[in-house]
Image (cartoon, coloured by chain):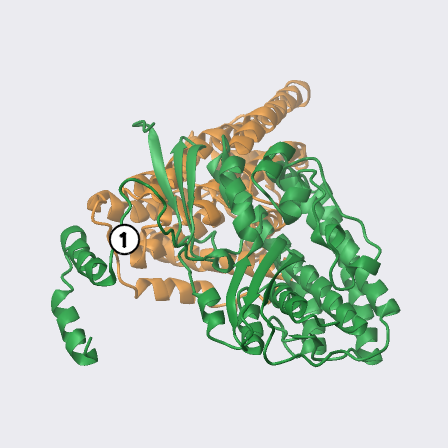
Chain colours: A orange, B green
Amino acid sequence: MIQALFNIIIFPGLLFLFTFALAAEYIDRKLSARLQNRMGPPWFQPLADFIKLLGKENILPCDADVHIFKFMPVLALTASVTSFLYIPLWQPKALNSFNGDVIVVLYLLTIPTLTYFLGGWYSRSVYSMIGAVRSLTQLFAYEVPLFMSILASALLANSWNLSEIALFYSQHPGYWLFNFIGFSIALISLLGKLEKTPFDIPEAETEIVAGSFTEYSGKLLAFFRLSIDVEMVVGSSLLAAVFFPFGLGLTPVLGFILYIAKVLFIVSLISFLRTVLARLRLDQMITLCWKYFAPLAFLQVIINLILKGVFLK
Amino acid sequence: MHNSRDVQVPFGPQHPALKEPESFLVTLRGEKITASSVKIGYNHRGIEKACEERTYIQDLYLIERICGICSHSHATAFAQAVEEIAGLEVPKRALYIRSLIGELERVHSHLLWLGVAGHEIGFDTLLMYTWRDREVVMDILSLLTGNRVNYGMNTIGGVRRDITPAQAKEVLKAVDILEERTKYYIKIATQETTIIDRLSGVGVLSKKDAISLGAVGPTARASGVARDVRKDDPYAAYGELDFKVITANTCDVYGRTVVRVQELMESYKMIRQILKDMPEGPITVRAPRKIPAGEAASRYEAPRGEDFHYVRSNGTEKPDRVKVRAPTLANVQAVSKMLEDRYLADMPIVIAAIDPCFSCTDRSIVIKNSGAKNSKTVPWEVLHVQSIEWYKERRGIDFSALNKKYAKAFKI
């Protein structure tokens, strides 16, 4: 009981996750600022932003559906936090695992996008509604390549259990190198999931103000922003677990450091990509995903099938 | 035609993409724009009327404040018109200095535009880089004139400050840095895939449309219309300078970007030539306080296009009429054409691509006896009562009590 509470509230649950999420946001912002030749924020800025937003007034649009409007930020946060429990961090075994949890994690990571849609749609503001529709349209474009690239890795490990996938790769060192295409596709799809440039189409500031979040303010916005940060950490952890499954048998301290390094590496890649690319148009994004990324992810599936057939009999 | 699937999106008067208050109402079907209308006039400042109340010298500083970016353009255009009426022979050195400041201004304006364009397509890195480099030219401008934007360089009959050899050396040094940076931006603009994807084929304005809608400046030149006042009707020192009119025939936003970055290179060339060939001599002639009766029109190629000033004098020390047509007024007509059948995502960059300056453009228009059937002249008192009624009916706000209070206080 106490163990479970500790796991949920402190480690690797809420407290650790929130701290890590805010730290990741700091790294992302600082790195992108330095790449853009700016100073960037001080280390406590994400926390300060969060606290400041918590203290602000909640403004509810009079046309909005109040219950859905208020519930969505909480749901977004809950979904991302829950999925974290199934991801192996520095041991081959996650806190919880069951057969098929990779699918559950992927679906839980889809829920935040759905909450952006519902929250935006029920704000009833024209910018929010356009942003909401864009979120959902984008979801259909990047989900397939993301699922395929992650499942390709699972296919090689012959398991749909994240812990078993991690175990497989630690028993067969070097095999993760074959998933490079899958990793690239998944990383780019993650940019879409996190709505970061070049896929920040649903919240394109110069077109639709803040998209789904236009009408959000105060605590609700704070929780939406936190959920995006948490999603960034969880998404990066998932990618690290699936595509960089090495060094899992180390001592807890070394393993923990290695895990943090892996996630920060992926976060750095995200901030690098969002700094050097311009925002795409929705039609260009969909073309890109279906025309190039989906076939490439499919190629990864074929590569893994061949590997499995030839080497892992 | 309004369809239930259509969504009307207000784009302004307040919107993150717009740096000044103006309003674009677009009708969307999905992501496609089916109709759009432009409404300007949110920032009318009454500058033309104010000019009639001030002396020519005071007007010069007021006119300079029409635009925060092409301030030198407006001031020079006005000074040229007044000098023409007064028949002043401006010294050659002053003309060269005017051209020098004009070109430095074009450099800062085009670099600013490049950053804004980057921001509009979600490429903030370009914004950060170009605006950092823009500081180089801003520093030079403040070194030469003492100010970063409103230079106060012109006076009727010449310029107010001379360029020393030491300053010229600093300018040349800065131009070298800027040239190198601009080459890098040309490389980015012509090679970076996401930029090209977002810019080419967007906001198309054919050569025919550009001419019939009266586009000016880089907007017209990117549609293949070689229209440049510096070449067509040389003023200041431009008649003696060696430069090309940059055009592009892609007719889209990409063309407008290429034209602007290439113009930067031409500006650097001109700045070097000006500093090399600048003649010695006085920088100003004495101008009379009272300008003889007459009228003059003056044209100036501002960074955004042709700037037109008309001045009429009546022999006193104040002008009788001043008319300013900023380049944006000529270009804004083309925006609706450029937006036809485009996506919502293209809207910010299409608007930004004419490098709009709406506050400079806003003028009030008075139509007298237009001949329309239901036109009537409404006296001020009636209009006042009507406005109170309008707010009472439409907005539920009753101003009449407040109005009575103020009427008593001010004894109206």
Residue A244 shown left or right of residue A113 in the figure: right
- The one nearer the camera, A139 or A145, is A139
Tell me the residue at 63%/45% (across/down): B219
Q: Chain of mark 1?
A: B
Tell me the residue at 76%/62% (across/down): B178
Q: Is residue B148 above or below residue B308?
A: below
- The one nearer the camera, B360 or B325, is B325
The quadrant of the image that shows the C terminus of chain B is bottom left
Q: Residue furthest right?
A: B276
* Image location (x, y in percent) of residue B411: 18, 79
Amino acid at the residue labelled 1: Thr
* Image location (x, y in percent) of residue B84: 67, 66
Local crowd size for mark 1, using a 10 Å CA cut-off: few (<14), some (14–19), many (≥20): few
Q: Residue furthest left?
A: B401
- The one nearer the camera, B368 or A140, is B368
Tell me the residue at 47%/68% (across/down): A44
Residue B377 shown left or right of residue A265 in the figure: left
Q: Is residue B76 above or below residue B193?
A: below
The quadrant of the image that shows the N terminus of chain B is top left
- The one nearer the camera, A59 or B5, is B5
Residue A199 makes an appearance in the image: no
Tell me the residue at 58%/47% (across/down): B354
Residue B173 shown left or right of residue B141 in the figure: right
* Image location (x, y in percent) of residue B137: 70, 67
User: Residue tagged by mark 1?
Assistant: B377
Element at label 1: loop
Residue A124 makes an appearance in the image: yes
Q: Is residue A147 above or below residue B87?
A: above
